[in-house]
Amino acid sequence: MTLRILSFLTSAALFGASAHAQLQRIVLQGSGEPQVFTDINAALVAAQANDLLYLSGGSFSGGGELVIDKPLHFIGAGVSPDSSSVTGTTTIATTNAGNSGHIIITSAASGSTFTGIRFDPQNYIQYGTSEANDDPVDLVFERCVFDARVITGFSGGTSSTVFNECVFHGYLYGTTGVTALLTRCILDFQAGTGAEVSGFDNGLTMRFCVGLGTRVGNSENVTIENCVFTRTSAPVWQSNGATLTNNLCVSPSLTSNMTAGAATGNVLGVVVSEIFVDESNTDFEWTDDLHLQATSVGIGMANDGTNVGIYGSNSPFKAGAVPHNPHFRSAVLSPATNANGELPVNIHTVAQPN
């Protein structure tokens, strides 16, 4: 469904399924005039390479498999219910179960970026439909939430992905040859056996992340630095050659069934209740506060002199995971026009520095 564009449309569209009960929509911005869609599949068909898609708050369902097969830039309204209360949070979902219900990103979508979106497929996010097209490179996910597993290739690929300030509630799988960089990410999935982050031989780097019960495994030569792991057993498993630097761990053991390449500056056996300001159940919630306690050993412990965990580095985790597009603080839309036929609108936005 394509609608005629109105003035200030891009801003108005982002209110979506908010408290004002506006229709959720997608604004497609390319080289021509903006277009507005309510159906994500229609928006993907209409989009040209390197177009921008602004998604309002609300849930956009692709029905069965949702395929992204061209480089596109997706900008959602955010993932935290509190920070995105005016617009509503943005979700991309699928509904079919069985062997469908995936969100698929093919090699042809190389260079795509995603920010401020929750991904909730019925099954999982998968790179490619087969080994022939499972190598998208230079993908960037920023301030996104993954409710299902993420599979970055079939077997022996070359895909490359950057995950900045993302939240993983499911598995993250790699394969030999693929690369993934996780910076200031939160991982809270606990499978009980095996490893929740697995398969990244020679290609995984994690910096300033928090693993709430999560384990990294089967990832030779992985680099993990300035992270916090609350798992009570070794958080790094079967990953020979790993470089492990300045990590804070609840477990008295850093590794299991492996020989690390280098392990320096790690602090083990920390009492979990003495790490974060507020986190009690190893399941990340937006009401949690993962800042370190003032007395935590992790203060100033990172190899750059900042804190370990997501609030370290020279660009700490952004409060509320607010996307980089202008953020809506308040919006008052009149239910009817005034005597002059005008619709009174009062919108308060705040520019985002990052």
Image: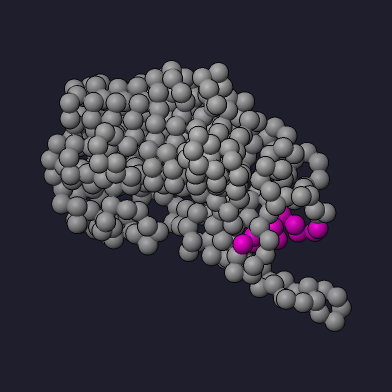
The answer to whether residue 288 is above or below residue 169 is below
Judge from the rendering whether residue 350 lies leftward or rightward of residue 295; answer left or right.
right
The answer to whether residue 164 is above or below residue 161 is below
Is residue 12 in the magenta section? yes
Q: Nearer the viewer, residue 188 or 102?
A: 102
Q: Nearer the viewer, residue 200 or 121?
A: 121
The location of residue 94, given as percent across then percent down, is 55, 45
How many numbered marks have been drawn onto this rendered protein structure?
A: 0
At x 59%, y 57%, the residue is 58
Judge from the rendering whether residue 302 lies leftward or rightward of residue 22; answer left or right.
left
Residue 65 visible in the current orientation: yes
Residue 352 visible in the current orientation: no
Looking at the image, what colour scheme do you see?
one colour
The location of residue 54, given as percent across then percent down, is 65, 49
The location of residue 26, given as percent across then percent down, is 68, 50
Is residue 288 in the magenta section? no
The answer to whether residue 334 is above or below residue 207 is below
Judge from the rendering whether residue 262 lies leftward or rightward of residue 312; answer left or right.
left
Q: Which residues are magenta?
A: 6-17
The location of residue 98, given as percent across then percent down, is 49, 38
At x 68%, y 61%, the residue is 23
Question: Which residue extends farthest bottom?
Answer: 339
At x 39%, y 46%, the residue is 169
Examine the image and state in which quarter residue 56 appears.
bottom right
